[in-house]
Image (tube, rainbow, N blue to C red):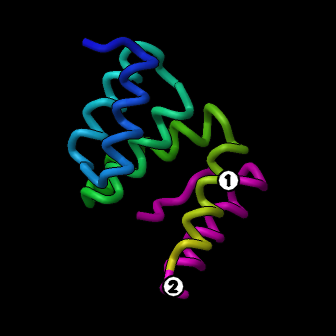
Amino acid sequence: YLGHSLSVLAAQGCSDLRKWPLAAKHAEAALSCRPGDVDALELLFRAQSELMERGKAQETLSTLRSVNPQRCMSLLTELAYSSHSPVERHRWLSEAVSCARGDASRKIL
């Protein structure tokens, strides 16, 4: 058990190395210490998305959105502009606009 800060750092390191299962594990550990931590939520969302855990990723995104809508919107915008597919870009930008408006989150994954 690493504690919150070390778990976030471990999750970030695993994410940088694209070791998604470990990134998710460490992000979840960080969240068990500090629920609602935006860094851990973002790392967990990225890992779940890469692991194709769509239901979990959608729940994590909804939590991030309720905890910090601005951070959620920034994440969605970043995902949109890093997407190569116009369909993916549209999906992420649409959700970012919805987040900015304060609309209820749609199932996007």
| In the image, residue 91 lies in the stretch drawn in magenta | yes
* Residue closest to the eye, 46 or 60: 46
Q: Main secondary structure of the magenta part?
A: helix
The residue indicated by pointer 1 is 73
Q: Position of residue 78 (x, y in %)?
A: 61, 62
* Residue at x-position 66% and y-position 44%: 71
Q: Position of residue 74 (x, y in %)?
A: 67, 53
The residue indicated by pointer 2 is 87
* Residue at x-position 56% and y-position 33%: 38
Q: Position of residue 22 (x, y in %)?
A: 23, 39
Q: Answer left or right for 48 relative to 90.
A: left
Q: Secondary structure at mark 2?
A: helix
Task: Give amino acid for label 1.
Answer: Met
Whole-number angstrom distance, CA of label 2 to CA of label 1: 18 Å
Image mark for residue 62:
none
> What residue span does the magenta drawing correspond to?
84-109
Task: Give amino acid for label 2.
Answer: Val
Q: Residues within 10 Å of mark 2 (few under 14, many from 20)?
A: few
| Furthest-bottom residue in this view | 86
